Image (cartoon, rainbow, N blue to C red):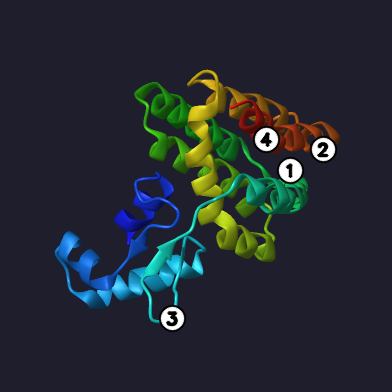
Amino acid sequence: MASLRSAIVAGRLRPGDRLTETDLAERLGTSRAPVREALRQLEQEGLVASRPYRATEVLGVTQEEIEQVLVPIRLTLESFAFRKALPHLTDGDLAELHGLVQSMRHAAADGNADALAAADVRFHELVIVRSGQEHCLQLWYAIEPRVRAHFRRDAPAHPHPSAVPDQHEELLAILATGDEPLVLDALEKHIREFLVVDREA
């Protein structure tokens, strides 16, 4: 399933591409049962859609969905979670976040968009975990595959490879202050930043 998810997120499988159990099983050198289960999981994640009596179809992450669905959900979810997490972030957490920024920097320098998106997702997820709000984490896991696809799709639109790690380094510096109004303002700017890039791309 990981290889299928990666192919969709990376754009190697494009919106509208049709996936059949038989073809995928042959391509992956496996039986149809694990392929069927993988497609079922990917459908739950919103990356594919199963059509009755037809092949499964790859779904894309459109700009309209990003602007009208993912960004508003993230703003609500992460603003609440970041506010709840602030009193609980330790020096160890900040060090781990710094390590993720460095991972982004290495991935960007190597042109590894998959690794860049993975570190980006993990950065936000870590803060949500530290919020201690289980419902927030459940909601995050529900949208995470499409957020990852969004990160993976749009990272190349930035004018410089270091843009994504630079943005997270700036957000981390403000997080370290523990100043709630500053953090929430910085988070909103951070989440909306992709929209500006997309419109200019």
Q: Position of residue 65 (x, y in %)?
A: 64, 52
Q: Closer to the camera: disc 1 or disc 4?
A: 4
The mark that comes first in sequence, 1 or 3, is 3
Dot 3 crowding, Cα within 10 Å, few <14, some 14–19, many 20+: few
The mark that comes first in sequence, 3 or 2, is 3
Residue 48's disc number: none
As helix, strand or loop, the secondary structure at mark 4 comes to helix
Residue corresponding to mark 3: 52
Q: Nearer the viewer, residue 96 or 20?
A: 20
| Residue found 68% across the figure and 38% down from its top | 191
As helix, strand or loop, the secondary structure at mark 3 comes to loop
Q: Closer to the camera: disc 3 or disc 2?
A: 3
Kind of residue indicated by mark 3 = Pro
From mark 1 to mark 3, how far is it between C-alphas? 47 Å
The mark that comes first in sequence, 4 or 3, is 3
The mark that comes first in sequence, 4 or 2, is 2
Dot 4 crowding, Cα within 10 Å, few <14, some 14–19, many 20+: some
The mark that comes first in sequence, 1 or 4, is 1
Q: Closer to the camera: disc 1 or disc 3?
A: 3
From mark 1 to mark 4, how far is it between C-alphas? 26 Å
Judge left or right: residue 75 versus residue 50: right
Residue corresponding to mark 2: 180
Kind of residue indicated by mark 4 = Leu
Residue corresponding to mark 1: 86
- Mark 1 and mark 4 residues within 8 Å of each other at the beta carbon: no
Kind of residue indicated by mark 2 = Glu
- Mark 2 and mark 1 residues within 8 Å of each other at the beta carbon: yes
- Mark 1 and mark 3 residues within 8 Å of each other at the beta carbon: no
Q: Closer to the camera: disc 4 or disc 2?
A: 4
Residue corresponding to mark 4: 195
| Residue found 36% across the figure and 51% down from its top | 13
From mark 2 to mark 1, how far is it between C-alphas? 7 Å
